[in-house]
């Protein structure tokens, strides 16, 4: 999160079944949200990227367990719940995409990309 410029950075990496990197992307979103909302927005951004690329069989791994749990568990009419509803809507268009939790130490590269997104977004 970049509090000075009121924005958040995101990054994700696409690997094949053997773990070979096939692509990477970054994004910035204006605004500062709670951590769980920011994590849900990151999932939404990654799914939008996957959908725009036309990929159908993908496993989306996130270290945000609260987001992973919310995808399965409940409806919530807070801003977080509304973002989760958007993520669920994207997943309806991507029926072969799986959404799974992974530990943070397995997601270090994506976090580095998110920091890179903030450094290279053309602001500041």
Image (spheres, rainbow, N blue to C red):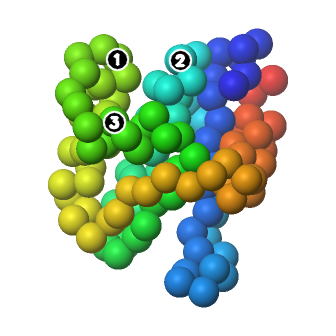
> Residue tagged by mark 3?
70
Say what secondary structure mark 3 lies in: helix
Q: Earlier in the sequence, mark 3 or mark 2?
A: 2
Q: Which residue is mark 1?
A: 79
Residue 58 percent location from the top left of the image: 40, 70
Q: Position of residue 19 (x, y in %)?
A: 63, 80
Find disc 2 in the rendering and name its residue: 33
Q: What residue sits 57% from the left and 24% below the top?
A: 35
Quadrant of the rendered image containing residue 82 = top left
Q: Is residue 43 visible?
A: yes
Mark 3 vs 2: CB contact within 8 A: no
Residue 37: x and y in percent read 47, 25
Total numbered circles: 3
Q: Residue at x 33, y 36 (%)?
A: 70
Side (left or right) of 82 relative to 29: left
Quadrant including the C terminus: top right
């Amino acid at each position: 999160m970049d509090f000075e410029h009121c924005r958040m950075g995101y990054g994700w990496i696409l690997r094949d079944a053997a773990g070979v990197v096939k692509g990477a992307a970054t994004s910035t979103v204006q605004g500062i949200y709670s951590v769980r909302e920011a994590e849900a927005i990151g999932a939404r951004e990654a799914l939008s990227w996957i959908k725009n690329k036309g990929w159908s069989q993908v496993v989306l791994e996130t270290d945000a367990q609260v987001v992973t749990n919310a995808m399965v568990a409940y409806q919530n009419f807070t801003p977080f719940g509304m973002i989760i509803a958007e993520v669920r809507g994207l997943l309806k268009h991507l029926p072969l995409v799986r959404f799974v939790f992974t530990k943070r130490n397995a997601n270090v590269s994506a976090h580095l990309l998110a920091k890179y997104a903030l450094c290279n977004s053309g602001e500041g």
